[in-house]
Amino acid sequence: MTLEDDVVRLRPFEERDVPAIAAACQDPEIPRWTAVPSPYTEADARQWLESDEEESFAVVDKQSDELLGSIGSAAPTRESPRLVTGLRRRRGGVGWQRVHSCS
């Protein structure tokens, strides 16, 4: 499934995203506020893509397909649904955010 507007596209992650995932996770704020290991390697990115811990979509620039971030759900259960979002830090200083529970 793919969702898009005039600016971004949400699509399933693909193997070709591995280098961009690993690069984005070098931001020291990510392991500070999440369970992402540091250092984060391409092997870690591949393992994450193959895991079933999260159902995530890549948020990419519609024109260039540049990886901007991710959105998805982590370990969803009826008792504890969780929404997970993340944006790469870029020119505007936008960074990683993780929402741990939804009501």
Image (tube, helix red, strand yellow):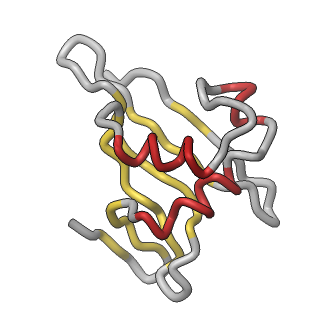
Vertical arrangement, residue 13 with respect to residue 35, above or below: below
Q: Residue furthest top?
A: 79
Horizontal side of 41 relative to 103 (left or right) equals right
What residue lies at 29% left-to-right and 36% top-to-bottom?
A: 52
Horizontal side of 26 relative to 96 (left or right) equals right
Q: Residue furthest bottom?
A: 63
Q: How many marks?
A: 0
Vertical arrangement, residue 7 with respect to residue 45, above or below: below
Horizontal side of 78 relative to 23 (left or right) equals left
Measuring from the top left, give residue 51's x and y in whole percent: 34, 37
Measuring from the top left, give residue 62's x and y in whole percent: 47, 81
What residue lies at 70% left-to-right and 56% top-to-bottom?
A: 23
Q: In which quarter of the view is residue 96 placed?
A: top right
Q: Residue furthest front?
A: 43
Q: Nearer the viewer, residue 13 or 100?
A: 13
What residue lies at 74% left-to-right and 55% top-to-bottom?
A: 89
Q: In which quarter of the view is residue 47 placed?
A: top left
Q: Nearer the viewer, residue 87 or 24?
A: 24
What residue lies at 51% left-to-right and 65% top-to-bottom?
A: 17
Q: Nearer the viewer, residue 47 or 92?
A: 47
Vertical arrangement, residue 55 with respect to residue 78, above or below: below
Measuring from the top left, give residue 65's x and y in whole percent: 51, 79
Q: Quadrant of the C terminus?
A: top left
Measuring from the top left, give residue 1's x and y in whole percent: 21, 66
